[in-house]
Image (cartoon, rainbow, N blue to C red):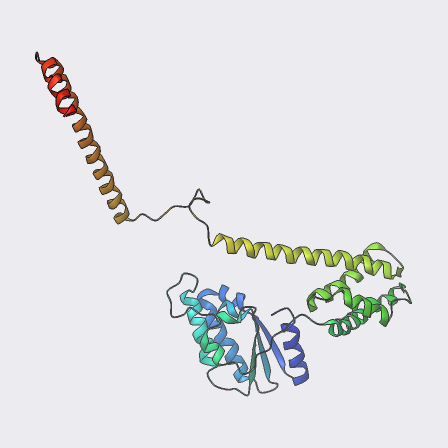
Amino acid sequence: MVPGKTLFAKTLSYHSNFDYIIINGGDVSALGIHASVELNKIFDFLKRRKNKKCIIFIDEAEAFLRKGRNESSIHFSESLRNALATFLYHTGSESKKYSIILATNCKDILDQAVIDRIDEQYNFHNPNIKEIQKMLTMYFNKYVYPLKKYNITIDSSIDNEYIHNLSNKLCGLSGRQISKLCLNIQSCVFGSDTKVVTKELINLITAWHLSNSLEQTNNQNVNKKKQHSSNYTSSDDNSNFKLKDNPNVHKKKNEQHHNITNIEQEHNKKENDENSKNINLNNTPNHDAIKKKVLINEQL
């Protein structure tokens, strides 16, 4: 999923004539032991409302609604389990008071009980060229064309045809990146004290914006590759890598070392015995006679 989820929730609440509450999942997990208490306050407040209905938009929902409550993990504390249990308690049945929208970039790690409570799912992909053109028209009307109020001239060549050509260059960007581009155009005009907005100026700002977006994407890909490769680090590649002490391994190593030592001792003993025999043999008075007998036996 890509940025656009928050705008979807706001648009839905606007057309439904609902109020909306935005909750960040990271803020809930940061509350610690107070997370479940604060969630209870929000749901109790919504149940007591008598006027307009409300949409609860929980962004980054995987921060406290993820899997792991049935497992012992340091990454899933008791406070998060209580927060998840509180959410499941208040969403166990349908309500006419409020509607809940969950936004996440990691839907596969959501708890199964949370997924069972979801009625509709929507994926937000990057906009196509037609959608980019509509967004450019909307954001130009919001950020660029109002510059006329400050005695800044908009070049007549910046028309629908130019916006169409510009949308082809922005293919692959998200809605948030496109809105930032149009806002950057406004900021650069105010910062440069220029009195005319030309195509050349917009093209320059666009090229700079695209280079930054591409660099950011490449950095994210590099970080993903590093994280993937780090999972396969061996003891030869990492000098700080240490195996956990295993008494059985040390026992086997000691036994093997003891056996090797015994073999070496036996080998040395045999060599010493042979050397002593040779010494004794050389010291005997009948050395020449014995040597002759040995030679005769070898010839036979």
Task: Where is residue 234? Give x, y as percent.
Answer: 43, 48
Residue 285 or residue 164, whichever sits in front: 285
Report how many numbered discs are placed on residues in the image. Answer: 0
Q: Residue at x 44, y 62 (%)?
A: 75
Q: Residue at x 46, y 68 (%)?
A: 34
Above or below 249: residue 69: below
Q: Residue furthest top?
A: 285
Left or right of 231? Residue 275 is left
Q: Residue furthest front?
A: 300
Above or below 112: residue 245: above
Task: Where is residue 273? Give x, y as percent.
Answer: 14, 25
In the picture, the quarter occupied by the N terminus is bottom right
Task: Where is residue 82? Give x, y as percent.
Answer: 42, 71
Q: Quadrant of residue 292?
A: top left
In the picture, the quarter occupied by the C terminus is top left
Residue 169 or residue 195, whichever sits in front: 169
Residue 85 or residue 117, whichever sits in front: 117
Left or right of 253? Residue 188 is right
Left or right of 119? Residue 143 is right
Task: Where is residue 38? Give x, y as percent.
Answer: 49, 72
Q: Residue at x 84, y 58 (%)?
A: 201
Above or below 266: residue 223: below
Left or right of 279? Residue 238 is right
Residue 291 or residue 11, whichever sits in front: 291
Q: Quadrant of residue 202?
A: bottom right
